[in-house]
Amino acid sequence: MKNSANAVLKSPFFAVGFIPVSFLALLLVAFGPVFTPDVAPLDEGVSDELTAFVEALDDSTKKARARERFVADSTHNALFLENRFPSANTCATCHPEHYEEWSVSSHAYAQLSPVFNAMHGKILKLTNGTNGDFCIRCHTPVGMNLGEPEFMTNMDRHPTSREGITCIACHRIKNPYGKVSGRLAIVEGDIFDPVYGSLGNEILEEVTEEGSDFRVNTERGKSGRAIHADASELPQISTSAFCGTCHDVNLVNGFRLEEAFSEYKSTSAAKDVTTCQDCHMGKVPGKAEGYLEGPAAIVGGQPTTVRKRTNHMFAGPDYSIIHKGIFPHNDRAAEMATIRQWLTFDYEAGWGTDEFESNIPDGFEFPERWQFADDRYDAREIITQNEALLARLDEERLAVLRAGYVLGDVKVGSVGRNGIDFEVEFKNGTNGHNVPTGFDAERLVFLEITVTDANGDVVFVSGDRDPNGDVRDLHSIYVHNGELPLDKYLFSLQSKFLTRMVRGGEREQVLAVNYSPSPLPFLRPSTRSTVLLGRPVGARKHRKTIGPLDSKWAKYKVTKKELRNSSPPYKANVKIVSQMIPVNLINEIQDVGFDYYMSPRTVADRVVEGAQILWDVDVDLSNGGAIANNLEETKHQSE
């Protein structure tokens, strides 16, 4: 009996649990306790632990002293870690504009992503833990430097660990590491210790010189606004090689997962010394058209000298699908409530708005943290601020994606009762790398084609979705179950993972982990030279990307049968759609659970809702391919 495709994503388990017991047992063996962080934030989880510890004591005095000691130790540990790895919230004091841009960026979302966390956990499970920190060390360098478990809920990670690629992940790196797949040593130190940047002490000296109006303190133990006493120059931080430290990912067995930096090295952009930063930190997303100008810092309300200022929003293909009280990062939100408390704030129901607060039904019960209307109004203010930031990021995401994915010409061949032939050109608008780039095997970018007749009736479609939100490729559950036909004209730029089978040959898979006949699968270096073989032994990618400034043509044929009972003239609607991941990935990784109590169905729906239509044109197939552009403003797939 076939499983219902929708039922696969509606398992009730994930609404209440995070990790299956069998996998928990596996990780306990491999890594020790999964949910016990080195330093837990003092939220409900810690309160439960504290209660259990205190209740185990008999004497009331001992209980009181134990409670005081527990809280004191937690506070001490939090301070101790801040002295090793300062939070972005600390940096925001003097760098508010940089912080605001970073707070909504893909860098800031890197570890909070429930999709990443589940995918990382699933790969750990499939490799029996031997994949180690290979994935996560790029997503939370602070967490890995702290020695946190590789797989655990973000709700129990240290707050700075949850910040992902936070300020110090780049500005406390003192060595030019090169392509090390994200294995970096962050220089430990408190706010007074040196930071590393492109200009050295040029601006800092202006702030710290004796007699300046900035009134700062660079010495421990003294009063005043604390700042770092030195800004050391790291020339590599303004080069593409610095980005290549994480954005070129190679596994120990020779498998090349991401090759953004390697692609860049052979382009005309590299030859002209146009850097990653020029396109991705400049004033026009995705294009090297100069930088904004502004102060490097605003200290006590006073700006420093105006200079080149880089944009830290780093818009790209990813977008948030989690609660808006959790992301973007917001220092007020962090002070107001824990993650678990924010998850109980129902902003979608209108909490904290006049309309809702004036019409609360009798007997309505709020969670304990949100009992008071003032708190709900304050929370709503934070949500509104975060929504504005997310909307701003959507605009920059659309801009950078449209710079890379360009709709070219449409060639119309024969048009008549016997069928219609036409081709659509898909171009790479950048000279810096392929499109997609990076994690291209999970980037869903495709053409959606709909041909209609004179009456508006659909006679042909390609690039449509199944009920789960997948395109109709080999990994659609509905196609796999025979409930929908394979889309043989689907034009997608998503690369595919091919894994080696036990008895030879290859198979296409959603994840690049071989099915193993052994009960103890593990990851290990290749026993054969990948240089001589020209490929890794276990898995590889079938790349479907488009090279820099190159293009591909998608060919379509509407058959005589499909035109039956229709009337000319015919029109083709052509869309380029970008979605951060395919829904089938969610199905593949769902058995380890999703963070923040999210169900697979919720994750899938939000992924599809966040997809963007980059280009939308109508083509008159009866008039040689005359094109009308429909895209007048930012649009989402759901609109």
Image: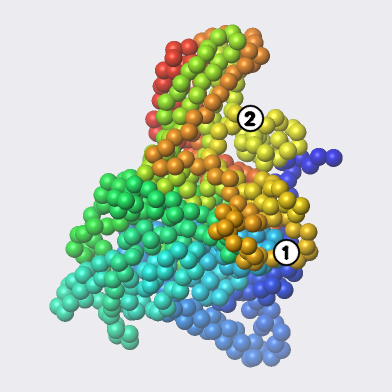
| Mark 1 vs mark 2, CA separation in Å | 35 Å
Residue picked out by circle 2: 488
Q: Position of residue 169 (x, y in %)?
A: 42, 67
271 or 41, nearer to the observer: 271
Q: Position of residue 516 (x, y in %)?
A: 75, 58
372 or 263, nearer to the observer: 263
477 shown above or below 193: above
Query: Which residue appears at 54% of the width and 80% of the height?
Result: 74
Query: Which residue appears at 63% of the width and 54% of the height?
Result: 539
Residue picked out by circle 1: 521
194 or 333, nearer to the observer: 194
Query: Which residue appears at 61% of the width and 60% of the height?
Result: 120
- How dense is the environment of label 2, judged by Cα within 10 Å: few (below 14), some, or many (20 and up)? few
- Residue 233 appearing in the image: yes
529 shown above or below 1: below
Q: Which mark, by number, is residue 561?
A: none
Q: Position of residue 130 (x, y in %)?
A: 65, 68
Q: Amino acid at mark 2?
A: Lys
